[in-house]
Image: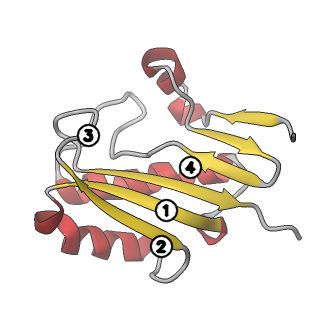
Amino acid sequence: MPDREIIVPESMKLIPERIGYVPAVKVGDTLFCAGQIGRTAELVVIEDPEQQFIAAWENQRTVLEAGGCSFDDVVDMTTYHVDLATHMDLFRRVKDRYFPDSQCAWTCIGVQALAHPALLLEIKCVAVQRRS
């Protein structure tokens, strides 16, 4: 079995210290990203829906890049949404700025709640690093 590499971008160093998980684990060419949310480096959840969605995508980009990947390398994505019907149009508009449709397998799930009461979204991805 290939070695596992723990991925913790500098802007996310508080996550393992305070919350107890890592942002990603890389095994071979595959990067398994933990769910990313719309929060600051200080772990403060952003309450404005659009800004929260933007921050979640930026956090996802940060994790992918720290693992040597980009959005182009994502092969599987699961998004978890609180109040899906209310925010889906806004979410899709923000998503399309970062991650156009038809780039990977995507599962979109409506949930009752996430880890913090102000959270509206969590984005979980698996990426396979392309070989040059």
Earlier-in-chain disc, 3 versus 4:
4
Characterize the local packing of mark 1: few (<14), some (14-19) or many (20 or more) Cα atoms within 10 angstroms. Answer: some
**Residue 35 position in % (x across, y down):** 45, 45
Where is mark 1, residue-wise? Answer: 77
Q: Are marks 4 and 1 in contact (CB under 8 Å)?
A: no
**Residue 101 position in % (x across, y down):** 45, 82
Characterize the local packing of mark 2: few (<14), some (14-19) or many (20 or more) Cα atoms within 10 angstroms. Answer: some
Earlier-in-chain disc, 3 versus 1:
1
Three-letter amino acid code at disc 3? Leu
Which of the two marks, 4 or 2, is nearer to us in this view? 2
Q: For residue 62, which numbered disc appears in the image?
A: 4
How far apart are the two marked residues, 3 and 1, measured between alpha carbons?
A: 17 Å
Three-letter amino acid code at disc 1? Met
Three-letter amino acid code at disc 4? Thr
Where is mark 2, residue-wise? Answer: 99
Characterize the local packing of mark 3: few (<14), some (14-19) or many (20 or more) Cα atoms within 10 angstroms. Answer: some
* Secondary structure at numbered mark 4: helix
* Secondary structure at numbered mark 1: strand
With respect to residue 39, does 130 lie above or below? below
Where is mark 3, residue-wise? Answer: 114
- The answer to which image quadrant residue 110 occupies is bottom left
Tally the numbered discs. 4
Q: Are marks 4 and 2 in contact (CB under 8 Å)?
A: no
How far apart are the two marked residues, 3 and 2, measured between alpha carbons?
A: 22 Å
